[in-house]
């Protein structure tokens, strides 16, 4: 017997309507390239989104199920595109601007984008490949001056497009299981793979992440969205903030540490999200140039890879800002876990609490995790035994777009993440490494992530990436690539070996070090270990 409950579709339209009805006065603030500030309300965004919906259907001829691309930084119009495209039943495809030209061309053709909305500053990236784009019929220019010149064919200006439209639009009825968004993986191990998010998965993700045990957002907050909107929907925050009624601050391309700190101060930001490299940069900038007034920032969520414990402790000790670890993937819509202390941990020492907080955390309701051995047998939740992390849940993919990839899924329906992890008795998960990045030396496993975290605890180390390199005797040995904070007052190999010897046994400690001005990064800001290994093999590291 089924329950006697009304059917209410969980769609992005429902999020938008709620945000306008309850939080129409809340603000979206954008810092455009060059620092120009723009501010408007959720209510104004709502009306412009309805104008956009009219333009998509009447002027651009977009139909339900069509894919529409965005090639843009974080700003108000990009939020409008999130809601307007999905609101008419089409699919919002956020294209990663940091991919190579060949990868961008591939994913636009693979996704069959009909129209692309592109920031004026990013137009040159598309001009290079425009003739190879097979399905794109129209380009719409965002934040472009009236006299903007481009070789892109069939261009319209976004503001002109909206001005011609009424701000009344009746949203169509949409099945909550229909696709609303699309992202592609970063393609570090092959061609990027498409991931389709449904209205239902997007709604449930936002509803869950805003809760106290998760993102802990409310209408009292002002949130700086540092994670790009082209990277896994900015971790879902454009939906989450509208649902929670939190002010959104969008930095556009102003991602330098000093610029972000200036925005944090000006807007009295209370929450922010970002990858570790962003927070490393902000921390060191704050240390070198302390602000005159204490930041209003209460906590930041960090994901993409682990932030060293020393940095989590440093932020809290030096600036009173709490760091919260999260974990997710493009394939998990994207967040799957977050690390907050439970009441039982309140009596623990600061160091013991920090050890827990440095883990990637507990799975959200609706998400399940398990770790398995190489033969597929379950591994006990003892916090020590490592295994492959697998995940399933209400916002985890069931397959890739147009691609089978059966090897990514188990026979009983779990997604294989490629992460090597532990889970403790309280269900806190900790990423030990990516499967491809673990180092096997003399038959023993070494975690590159653990070494990196320890190296970055040195006061004069800004970044550290560790990779496996071939060794005749041990098969593999760790190579440490280190970026000093102060090039004129460098750190020595001897200092780093001494530091590591406090927490690692001798076979785990690297004896090969390379000092670099910067560690290569992937398109989403992670250390590009594939590129480091390539450079080492080619003799380009010195």
Image: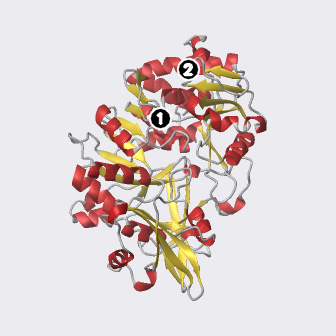
Q: Quadrant of the N terminus?
A: top right
Secondary element at image label 2: loop
Camera sees residue 482: yes
Q: Position of residue 418 (x, y in %)?
A: 58, 64
Residue 433 vs 272, above or below: the answer is: below
Q: Position of residue 224 (x, y in %)?
A: 39, 38
Q: Does 23 sit left or right of 206 as displayed?
A: left
Q: Residue at x 52, y 64 (%)?
A: 370
User: For residue 81, what is the image quadrant?
Assistant: top right
Which of the two residues, 316 or 477, is positioned nearer the viewer here?
Answer: 477
Check residue 252 in the rendering and tell me which mark sits there, or answer none.
1
Q: Residue at x 61, y 51 (%)?
A: 186
Which of the two residues, 462 or 8, is positioned nearer the viewer here?
Answer: 462
Q: Does 14 sit left or right of 267 as displayed?
A: right
Q: Position of residue 429 (x, y in %)?
A: 43, 63
Q: Quick one: label 2 or label 1, which is nearer the N terminus?
A: 2
Secondary element at image label 1: loop
Residue 477 vs 136, above or below: the answer is: below
Which of the two residues, 314 or 377, is positioned nearer the viewer here?
Answer: 314
Check residue 145 in the rendering and tell me which mark sits there, or answer none.
2
Q: Position of residue 148 (x, y in %)?
A: 61, 22
Near mark 2 (Cα within 10 A), the count class, few <14, some 14-19 or many ≥20, is few
For the residues marked 2 and 1, what is the alpha-carbon distance in whole angstroms? 17 Å
């Amino acid at each position: 017997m089924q329950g006697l409950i009304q059917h209410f579709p969980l769609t992005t339209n429902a999020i938008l309507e709620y945000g306008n009805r309850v939080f129409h006065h809340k603000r979206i603030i954008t810092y455009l390239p060059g620092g120009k500030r723009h501010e408007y309300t959720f209510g104004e965004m709502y009306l412009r989104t309805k104008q956009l919906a009219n333009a998509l259907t009447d002027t651009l001829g977009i139909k339900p199920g069509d894919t529409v691309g965005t090639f843009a930084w974080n700003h108000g119009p990009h939020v409008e595109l999130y809601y307007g495209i999905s609101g008419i039943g089409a699919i919002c495809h956020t294209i990663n601007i940091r991919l190579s030209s060949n990868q961008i061309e591939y994913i636009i053709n693979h996704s069959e984008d009909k129209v692309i909305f592109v920031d004026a500053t990013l137009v040159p990236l598309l001009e290079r490949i425009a003739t190879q784009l097979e399905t794109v019929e129209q380009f719409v220019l965002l934040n472009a001056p009236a006299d903007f010149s481009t070789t892109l064919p069939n261009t319209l200006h976004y503001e002109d497009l909206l001005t011609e439209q009424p701000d009344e639009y009746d949203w169509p009825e949409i099945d909550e299981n229909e696709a609303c968004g699309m992202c592609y993986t970063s393609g570090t191990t092959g061609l990027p793979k498409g991931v389709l998010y449904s209205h239902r998965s997007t709604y449930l993700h936002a509803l869950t992440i805003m809760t106290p045990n998760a993102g802990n957002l409310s209408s009292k907050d002002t949130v700086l969205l540092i994670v790009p909107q082209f990277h896994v929907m900015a971790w879902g925050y454009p939906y989450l903030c509208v649902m929670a009624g939190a002010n959104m601050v969008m930095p556009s391309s102003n991602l330098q540490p000093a610029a972000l700190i200036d925005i944090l101060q000006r807007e009295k930001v209370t929450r922010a999200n970002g990858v570790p490299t962003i927070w490393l940069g902000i921390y060191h900038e704050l240390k070198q140039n302390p602000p005159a007034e204490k930041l209003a920032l209460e906590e930041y969520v960090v994901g993409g890879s682990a932030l060293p414990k020393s940095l989590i402790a440093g932020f809290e000790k030096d600036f009173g800002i709490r760091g919260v670890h999260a974990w997710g993937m493009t394939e998990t819509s994207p967040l799957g876990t977050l690390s907050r202390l439970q009441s039982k941990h309140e009596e623990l020492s600061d160091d013991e609490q920090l050890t827990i907080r440095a883990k990637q955390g507990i799975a959200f309701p609706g998400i399940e995790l398990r770790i398995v051995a190489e033969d597929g047998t379950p591994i006990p939740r003892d916090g020590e035994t490592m295994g492959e992390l697998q995940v399933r849940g209400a916002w985890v993919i069931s397959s890739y777009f147009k691609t089978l990839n059966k090897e990514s899924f188990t026979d009983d329906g779990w997604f294989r993440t490629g992460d090597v992890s532990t889970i403790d008795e309280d269900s806190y998960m900790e990423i030990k490494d990516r499967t491809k990045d673990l180092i096997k030396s003399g038959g023993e496993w070494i975690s590159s992530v653990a070494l990196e975290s320890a190296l970055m605890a040195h006061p004069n180390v800004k970044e550290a990436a560790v990779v496996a390199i071939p060794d005749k005797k041990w098969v593999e040995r760790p190579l440490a690539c280190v970026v000093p904070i102060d090039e004129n007052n460098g750190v020595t190999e001897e200092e780093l070996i001494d530091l590591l010897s406090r927490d690692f046994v001798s076979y785990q400690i690297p004896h090969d070090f390379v000092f670099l001005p910067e560690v290569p990064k992937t398109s989403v800001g992670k250390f590009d270990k594939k590129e480091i290994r390539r450079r080492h093999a080619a003799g380009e590291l010195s």
